Image (cartoon, grey):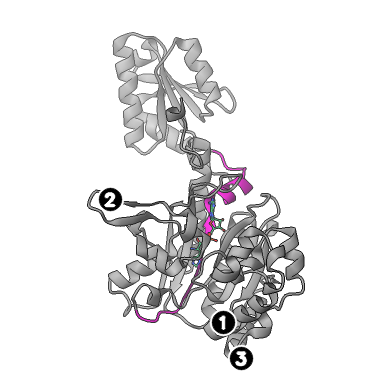
Amino acid sequence: MELLQPVRGTADLLPEDKARHNHVVSVALDVARRSGFQEIATPVFEFTQVFSRPLGASSDVVAKETYSFEDRGGTGLTLRPEGTASAMRAVISNGLTQSLPLRWFYAGPMFRYERPQKGRMRQFHQFGCELIGLASPLADAEIISLGAAILSDLNVLQRTTLHLNSLGDQESRLAYRQALIDYLKQYRSSLSKDSQRRLDANPLRILDSKSESDQSILAEAPRLPAYLSDSAKAHFEQVSNCLNEAGIVFELDPLLVRGLDYYSHTAFEFITDELGAQGTVLGGGRYDGLSETLGGPPLPAVGFAAGIERLALLGSDIAAAAPDIGLLAADIKPEVEAEAFGIAETLRRAGLSCVMLINGNMGKKMKAANRLGFAFVIIAGSDELSRGAVCVRCMANGEQSEVKISALTSWLFERLDGTAQKGHTG
Ligand code: HAM
């Protein structure tokens, strides 16, 4: 029954998975807020040109990975494959070019028709940060430091290496592009099929080819840093100086080009070797030309995005939050069940987390209560209820107390205080 499966490359986020995702996003947002970033959300679909122009017709994403369709009115739309072009579109369409710089955070689903494997999905989730309106190399360094700080708070920074490169300005890139074509042309027939295609369309992308024979040809190829203009070199040096001052360790990687066409100057990736082939957990760079490709004014900008699935795979020590309190009626008399129902509702309204166990006899309910990890289980029996009380069992030590219903909320608050923050322990 294919219909009953999720579509290839998509997945349900069941409570444990969703808890991990939420944890990643809330840590990231917390760190970003402390650096002055504000959260935004843009639509999950845009006019197709919002992505096709800035990302580049020759990029893999636009050439073969977008989910593009015509809506019922015949308008060409694309499910967003990433968030940067949407963010820039939002700056322009909301007339915010007078309110710069903007520091924006976003999180949500992205869509790419890629070959699914561990850490690579067709619907995946990213959070991202964009710093729009600053040309200074300090902005590049700020964005990279922010990425490092988020990974550090997620306890994964130590398991990644920061790769850093400069793609230079347009002048540098054009000079290098020609040098690379001249060199690779001699080996055209020995290159992989993908690289042969890229030689004409997008030669810089050949640099991160996974093919071993391509890599051996590239060993002698000209290197981008030698083609940087003086101003591009100065920009990159200042980024490196700031990172050094901030104690952020990086590796220079002249082969790092990134998959989207809009980058100039700084490009970077935090890579782990613990996730197989899909090791980039967070990547980004400067994209000064993007606004103009959308028809906006020149607008310098730099940012990054991180894969939430990949970060969730790395940090496996996060549990789904269970409610603190389980409540069950000790017998199935309708009036006892109704009174127990009322008590559960009162506790929730007071701000406690409480779930009522409804199915089965007393034994079954107690078994479920033991399994579900509550801090307290409230047993509402006829005798206690007739005295205006319930029995409360502390699950940590098995102690049972009779507590007056009128005092129940404050009794629980007192004991849960400090231990109430269950769940997100990572
Ligand atoms: P990206 O490198 O295409 O950059 O994606 C960023 C991150 O999203 C990747 O490092 C990876 O962790 C995750 N990711 C990408 N594709 C998939 C997939 N198919 N399945 C699971 N995870 C995936 C961008 O998207 C740029 N917008 C980043 C940026 C922001 N540059 C400047 N500002």
Above/below status of 28 relative to 12: below
* Magenta residues, start to end: 297-319
Where does the image place residue 245, in percent across and percent down from the top left?
65, 79
Which sits earlier in the primary sequence, circle 3 or circle 2?
Answer: 2
Marks 2 and 1 sit apart, C-alpha to C-alpha, by: 38 Å
- Label 1 sits on what residue type? Leu
Q: In the structure shown, which secondary structural element does the residue marked by tag 3 occupy?
A: helix
Marks 3 and 1 sit apart, C-alpha to C-alpha, by: 15 Å
Which sits earlier in the primary sequence, circle 2 or circle 1?
Answer: 2
Residue 202 found in image quarter:
bottom right
At 52% across and 73% down in the image, what residue appears?
263
Whether residue 86 is visible, yes or no, is no
For this rendering, which residue is in front, 10 or 379?
10
- Label 2 sits on what residue type? Asp
Disc 2: which residue: 71
At 42% across and 29% down in the image, what residue appears?
3
Where does the image place residue 281, in percent across and percent down from the top left?
59, 57
Q: Disc count in the image?
A: 3
Give the class, few, some or many, for how many residues have Cα within 10 Å of label 2's Cα (few <14, many ≥20).
few
Q: Seen in the image, is 348 located left or right of residue 30? A: left
Disc 3: which residue: 230
Q: Which mark is residue 174?
A: 1
Q: In the structure shown, which secondary structural element does the residue marked by tag 1 occupy?
A: helix
Give the class, few, some or many, for how many residues have Cα within 10 Å of label 1's Cα (few <14, many ≥20).
few
Q: In the structure shown, which secondary structural element does the residue marked by tag 2 occupy?
A: loop
At 35% across and 27% down in the image, what residue appears?
344
For this rendering, which residue is in front, 317 or 289?
289
Residue at disc 1, CB closer than 8 Å to ligand 1: no
For this rendering, which residue is in front, 219 or 140?
219
